[in-house]
Image (cartoon, rainbow, N blue to C red):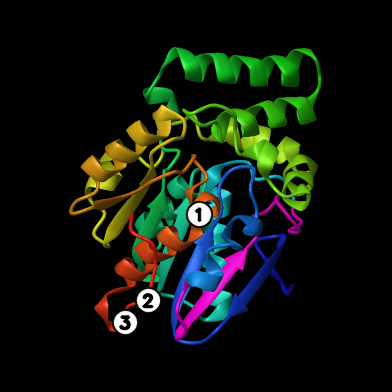
Amino acid sequence: MPVVAVNGARLHYEEQGAGRSVFFVHGTGASSFVWERTLPHLPQGHRLITYDRRGFGKSAAPPARRLGDHVADAAALLRHLGAAPALVVSQSGGGPIALRLAIDFPESVQGLVIAEPAYQVSLHPSGQVMVALGKMLGRWLVLRDPVGAAVSYYRWATRLTTGGNNYDAFPEEWRSTAIAHSATTLREVLQLVPPLPSRRHLRRLSCPTMIVIGDRGVPVFRRTSATVQRLVPGASSVAIANTSHLVPADQPAAFAAAIIEALGPANGTVDLPPR
């Protein structure tokens, strides 16, 4: 996996193919592994770029002090690779980063595909959310158990309305990677609390935006998805069945179909399951 030094970070990235750039921004607690199942379903003729954000996966850097550090990293990586402008695909905590990237660096973004953005979760309160955050903070700050705190968050975030969670069903390599960057995950959960980007900025966003929503995950993320769709002018949405919050890993072929739809009709058709 190649490495590029930007903004004091060493970011691990991978790319395949040539053509229009598709740039993937993973969510909180994940790394580039979240896209592994989606990439094989995308057609040739595109330059697909995945990377581990600072503090996650194989990337090394001082901890991000704010989400804006990840935004600056993404813009710098796109410039370094000569990959801008790109269709930017993101999920969960990567959603606010992708939105900020489109706002702060509009020349880098042709369009957005965001799976269940973790946008202003604190402004969509519920008993379930408060209990989950309370358990996480208690294990982290009181019991001094960052791994246990992060795992409790992972299990909550991938919880299914039909019972259980998808974190426990992840491949061992995925779970080991997620555990290894537990401290970064916990810091980022708190960094997602402030209402950024602002609603005013979202209302001024002009690039094509598609919101992808699952049907069996934690309800708060369906509410945050609806908020983003309502605020971003012209934003559309796609619902994908049988998914937790981690839509790209749960239904990769259907998620790839959403990306292909965002890329436009010039990309042809492929046989993918209905959504």
Residue 109 in the image: above or below residue 226: below
x, y percent for residue 137:
66, 19
x, y percent for residue 32:
63, 59
Q: Does the magenta stretch include residue 58?
A: yes
Q: Which residue is drawn at 46% across and 43% down?
A: 243
Q: Residue at x 33, y 81 (%)?
A: 267
Q: Which of marks 2 and 3 is in front?
A: 2
Residue that mark 2 sits on:
270
User: Where on the picture, by quarter, is residue 180?
Assistant: top right
Amino acid at the residue labelled 3: Gly
Q: What element carries label 1?
A: helix
The reply to whether the C-beta atoms of the residues labelled 2 and 1 are less than 8 Å apart is: no
Residue that mark 3 sits on:
268
Q: Is mark 2 on a helix, strand or loop?
A: loop
Magenta span: chief secondary structure: loop
Nearer the N terminus, badge 2 or badge 1?
1
- Please give the range of residues in magenta: 42-61
User: Where on the picture, by quarter, is residue 74?
Assistant: bottom right
The C terminus, quarter of image:
bottom left
Q: Is the residue marked by circle 1 packed among few (<14), some (14-19), or many (20+) residues within 10 Å?
A: many
x, y percent for residue 272:
39, 67
Amino acid at the residue labelled 2: Val
The reply to whether the C-beta atoms of the residues labelled 2 and 3 are less than 8 Å apart is: yes
Q: Does the magenta stretch include residue 185?
A: no
Amino acid at the residue labelled 1: Pro
Question: Who is closer to the viewer here, 48 or 36?
Answer: 36
x, y percent for residue 271:
38, 73
Residue that mark 1 sits on:
248
Question: Who is closer to the viewer here, 167 or 81?
Answer: 167
